[in-house]
Image (spheres, grey):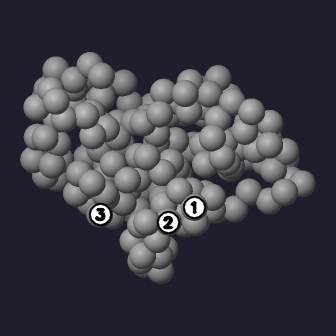
Amino acid sequence: MRTFLFDADAFRCLHGLKLLDPVLDALCGHGSNVVTEYIARHELNLLSSVVDLYEKAGTLSIERVVKGTAAGVRYRQLQRTADKGEAEAIAWALEASSSTLFVTRDKGARDLAIAQGVAVTDVMGIVVEACELAGMDRELAKSCLAVWDDPGQQLCRPNPYPGFEQTYAERVQQRT
């Protein structure tokens, strides 16, 4: 079982692309979907009712990094190079499990997580994971991500993005 740890930007992107429900539902049967407390309560405050619904349904867990623990100390250290939400998520991931996959669209957070030894993916990567691992409808993903076919649309669009089919195939080969 894998842990899928979402930062606020990735969570908001999936929500905006109408993929949050299908991704979380699909992955729920193959692991746990997690956001850390700072992300849930502060960075996702405008989506608090959505976060609360997922938490009550058991589709999403909110994890806390406790001051004074190893994760708490690491969190304070990581805040020097990352924002609070990303620092907390990476600190939590380092204490949680080697099977944690951190989902972020932020290059700085991705680079920091990789440097710390945390597996990372982006919005396209978690969509591919939901389809390949958990059987989420690939055509639904393609339809929701059709907005990326417009080069002017930047909502979490990976760079480069030569189109859904080619990007999907490349990501299948890169799965961690």
The image shows residue 98, relative to residue 46, as above or below, that is above
Residue drawn at point x = 29 percent, y = 63 percent: 21
Residue drawn at point x = 53 percent, y = 56 percent: 43
Q: Residue 68: image x %, image y %?
A: 89, 54
At mark 2, the secondary structure is: helix
Tag shown at residue 42: 1
Look at the numbered discs 1 and 2 and tell me whether their residues touch, using CB distance below 8 Å: yes
Q: In this rendered view, identify the residue nearer to me: 47 or 160.
A: 47
The three-letter amino acid code for the residue at tag 2 is: Asn
At mark 3, the secondary structure is: helix
Q: In this rendered view, identify the residue nearer to me: 53 or 12.
A: 12
At mark 1, the secondary structure is: helix
The image shows residue 170, relative to residue 41, as above or below, that is above
Label 3 Cα neighbours within 10 Å, binned few <14 / some 14-19 / many ≥20 = few
Q: Is residue 16 visible?
A: yes
Which quarter shows the C terminus? top left
The three-letter amino acid code for the residue at tag 3 is: Asp
68 horizontally vs 115: left or right: right
Label 1 Cα neighbours within 10 Å, binned few <14 / some 14-19 / many ≥20 = some
Q: Residue 11: image x %, image y %?
A: 41, 53
The image shows residue 18, relative to residue 147, as above or below, that is below
Of mark 3 and mark 1, the one earlier in the sequence is 3
Residue drawn at point x = 41 percent, y = 62 percent: 28
Tag shown at residue 156: none
Of mark 3 and mark 2, the one earlier in the sequence is 3
Q: In this rendered view, identify the residue nearer to me: 149 or 126.
A: 149
Residue under label 2: 45
Q: Residue 129: image x %, image y %?
A: 34, 42
Label 2 Cα neighbours within 10 Å, binned few <14 / some 14-19 / many ≥20 = some
The three-letter amino acid code for the residue at tag 1 is: His
Q: CA distance from mark 3 to mark 2?
A: 18 Å
Residue under label 3: 21
